[in-house]
Image (tube, grey):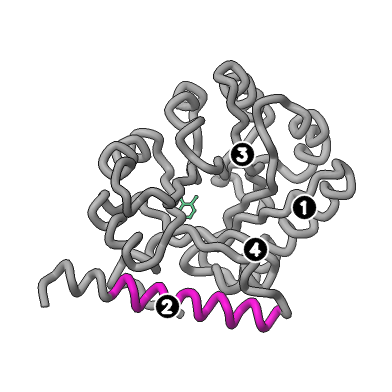
Amino acid sequence: MGADERYARFLRERREEILGRIAEAAARAGRDSDEIEAIAVSKTVGPDEVLLARRAGWRLFGENRPQELGRKLEALGQLPEMADARFDMIGNLQKNKINQVIGRVALIHSISSAHLAEAVSSRSAQRGLVSNVLLEVNVSGEASKSGFAPDELRACVEGVVSLPGIRVLGLMTMAPAGSADAARRTFSGLRELAEELRARTGLALGTLSCGMSDDFQIAVEEGSTLVRLGRCVFDQGYALS
Ligand SMILES: *Cc1c(COP(=O)(O)O)cnc(C)c1O
């Protein structure tokens, strides 16, 4: 068996393990696992690996740099096998890169300020687009993390959700690394904030993007509807817990 075949087999087997873990975590929380989607974060691999991952069953992909997103779309966009694949932007978005992203991704997870929301709104409206977005919240309050502070979002949410050119589908967060308890508090905090903002805005805000390789099972227990998985999908050296 060649290296490509071995890697393809790893991708298939690992995907089954991951989907099994998601189903188990959903069952522990009394949730229907159909309401949880998983994104394969392809930022560290090339187009060839993305194609192998598509063949292994992954359909949703996440990228964190506009230039790399463009490279992947150029290499893969015309392939029939990728016709129903979807790419999301999950990383920090600089204002001068917005035009490289809107219209090319299904969802922007990382709207981290009112300023950025306004910029994506106006660029999208100019082009006659409506961009699906999530508002990134710094639930844990770590200085190193981007996103709205919860109070800041409470103060501006009505204005943000009424902007033209964007459709706010929910919230996104990243948990502190290394502590299961802190991760759990972060994810439950995101869910509670979404409930509060749902009541306030009347929007469904049904998408909660949270959970990565190290903490996605906790995220599913706490209400995540969209987990973003990089290392555990693509890295053969990553041991799934
Ligand atoms: C890289 C990345 C992920 C995936 O992280 P892993 O720990 O590799 O699963 C998820 N979300 C964002 C925003 C990322 O940048």
Query: Which of the marked residues, 3 or 1, is nearer the chain's N terminus?
Result: 3
- Whether residue 20 is in magenta: the answer is yes
Q: Residues within 10 Å of mark 2 (few under 14, many from 20)?
A: some
Q: Quadrant of residue 114?
A: top right
Q: Amino acid at mark 2?
A: Glu
Residue at 55% across / 75% down in the picture?
22
Question: Which residue bears the numbered disc 2?
Answer: 16
Mark 1 element type: helix
Mark 1: C-beta under 8 Å from nearest atom of ligand 1: no
Mark 4 element type: loop
| Residue 152 coordinates in the image, percent (x, y) | 76, 37
Q: Amino acid at mark 4?
A: Ser
Q: Residues within 10 Å of mark 4 (few under 14, many from 20)?
A: many
The Cα–Cα distance between marks 2 and 4, rounded to whole angstroms, is 19 Å
Q: Residues within 10 Å of mark 1 (few under 14, many from 20)?
A: many
Question: Which residue bears the numbered disc 4?
Answer: 224
Residue at 29% across / 47% down in the picture?
79
- Which residues are drawn in magenta? 10-29
Q: Which mark is residue 194?
A: 1
Mark 3 element type: strand
Question: Which residue bears the numbered disc 3?
Answer: 132
Residue at 66% across / 68% down in the picture?
184
Apparent side of residue 2 relative to residue 35 in the rendered image (left or right):
left
Q: Is residue 167 above or below residue 7?
A: above
Q: Is residue 215 above or below residue 115?
A: below
Mark 2 element type: helix
Q: Which residue occupies the extreme right position in the image?
A: 199
Q: Are marks 4 and 1 in contact (CB under 8 Å)?
A: no
Query: Which of the marked residues, 4 or 1, is nearer the chain's N terminus?
Result: 1
